[in-house]
Amino acid sequence: MSRLIVISNRVSAATGGATGAQGGLSVALTSALRESGGLWFGWSGNVTEEFSGQISFHREDGVTTATVDLEEQDVEEYYNGYANRTLWPLFHYRVDLAEYRRGFADGYQRTNERFAETVFPLIEPDDMVWVQDYHMIPLGQELRKRGCDNRIGFFLHTPWPPRRLLLTLPEASDLVATLFAYDVIGFHTDEWLQSFVEFVVFESGGVYEDGILKLEGRQIRLIICPIGIDSDEFATLATGKTAQQTFRQMRESANGRAMIVGVDRLDYSKGLEERFLGYERFLVESPEERKEVFLLQIAPPSRGTVESYKRIRSTLEGLSGRINGAHADLDWVPIRYVNQGYPRAVLAGVYRAARIALVTPIRDGMNLVAKEFVAAQDPEDPGVLILSRFAGAAVQLTEALLINPYSAEEMADAIRTALAMPKAERIRRWQAMFEVVCQQDVLWWRVRFTDALTQGHGT
Ligand code: ADQ
């Protein structure tokens, strides 16, 4: 068995990184790393005066992590800059928010070179290298330049944008070309994969056939590999003591009303503004039903130093204030808007107490909240999932009420449909979704990717 080397921007499972998917992801990767005796490399999250490439090793639960500090300029240009202000908005179709600056692009490239320089000496001849996410697109190529001929795979956790959107990025073709260094590239859905293929075929002259992309004398295997959650853990959490306690608290404070829940990082890609507007429309259109429900929106702030995140935060504060001001009564507030994170066990109890979940991103690579909600439900009396068509999860969770989040009307209709849905239908829909969530869990995802990497050595 080859050792697995995982490389991602942030390593620490406990402290939480940019993608926030630590729970299941770290469980899945940790077990693979433990079994294969590999290691996990990335940024420590710390800033140093001058980059030294000095690695801090840490060993816990049979897993070795190796981290490196970055200079302030790296963090500014690579992380806050190119990753969060250029690629993230662009990859979520928000060209209007994307900032294209040579300084960011250069800092991104430089930092990836630094990562490659640092991690390369740790890689042994038979190791399998797995690079995660948009922070590290050029890393594989930088490893190749240094003589690494190991199998190297790349997985993208976000959507891949359509060709014409990607073309707005000045260095798009060069960035895409760095991906040709990988042996396997994985996407959550066929849609993201096809967008990538279209770019490469049109702009770089590649040929795509039977899952293999051929160009520049190389063969790259492209796979659809939707990430899952640790469904066993989540279903167990949902009936545990903490979750039960939370469940009771929520039901008590709901006072007989149906709870609609939203749980998201405070990010413009999550469609929170659209969600509030859709919910407001429901309040206006359904005077009879509106006081029978309330919306609990949990949204811990993320990437708070970036201007577009400050803006979305203040927009949501304004909107929730306006909606509550216009509709609240002496004994009822339509939106409970909470800006903090909670332990997973508490979230599980919140999900279970909800009658409806609103998961309405304008774009999302996958969306794990949708899957966590499903896993946490009571099989005898499950809630209804209202899910954006533009989340990767919509491909698997077809029994959700699928909506277009840009349409407040569709959202309001879906809330009414969910409230009126007979128990038998709720159970039928939930069972179909629960089966997928359990079968295609995070372990399934990891094995699917590493199997492809084991077989698919590019030439
Ligand atoms: P994210 O954009 O962070 O991940 P998501 O998949 O929804 O989005 O994962 C969020 C995680 O954070 C969930 O596990 C959720 O429970 C947790 N979380 C959110 N709010 C929380 C709160 N208030 N308290 C505690 N925990 C909270 C990126 C991509 C996604 C993709 C994942 C994995 O953007 O599309 O699904 O990576 O590939």
Image (cartoon, rainbow, N blue to C red):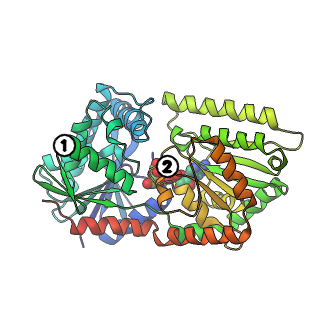
Q: Is residue 204 above or below residue 64?
A: above
Q: Is residue 80 left or right of residue 374?
A: left
Spot the residue most to the left. 217
* Amino acid on which disc 1 is placed: Ser
Q: Label 2 belongs to which residue?
A: 390
Image marks 1 and 2: residues in contact by CB distance under 8 Å: no
Label 1 vs 2, first from the N-terminus: 1
Q: Residue at horizontal 61%, vertical 60%?
A: 373
x, y percent for residue 90: 39, 37
Q: CA distance from mark 1 to mark 2?
A: 27 Å
- Image coords of residue 203 (percent x, y): 21, 40
Q: Image point 46% across, 68% down: which residue?
A: 441
The residue closer to the viewer here, 168 or 10, is: 168
Residue 101 sits above or below residue 353 on the image: above
Residue 200 appears in the figure: yes
- The local secondary structure at tag 2 comes to loop
> Can you tell which mark lies on residue 115?
none
On the picture, is 132 further left or further right than 110? right
Residue to which mark 1 is pinned: 204
Mark 1: secondary structure: helix
Q: Position of residue 386 (x, y in %)?
A: 62, 55
Quadrant where the image shows the C terminus: bottom left
Residue 349: x and y in percent read 68, 61
Residue furthest to the right in view is 330
Quarter of image, res 375: bottom right
| Residue 118 visible, this angle | no
Left or right placement of residue 357 versus residue 162 in this view = right
Indicate the amino acid at tag 2: Phe
Count neighbours of disc 2 (C-alpha within 10 A) and say few if under 14, some if 14 to 19, many if 20 or more: many
Neighbours of disc 1 within 10 Å: few (<14), some (14-19), many (20+): some
Question: The N terminus is located in which quarter?
Answer: bottom left
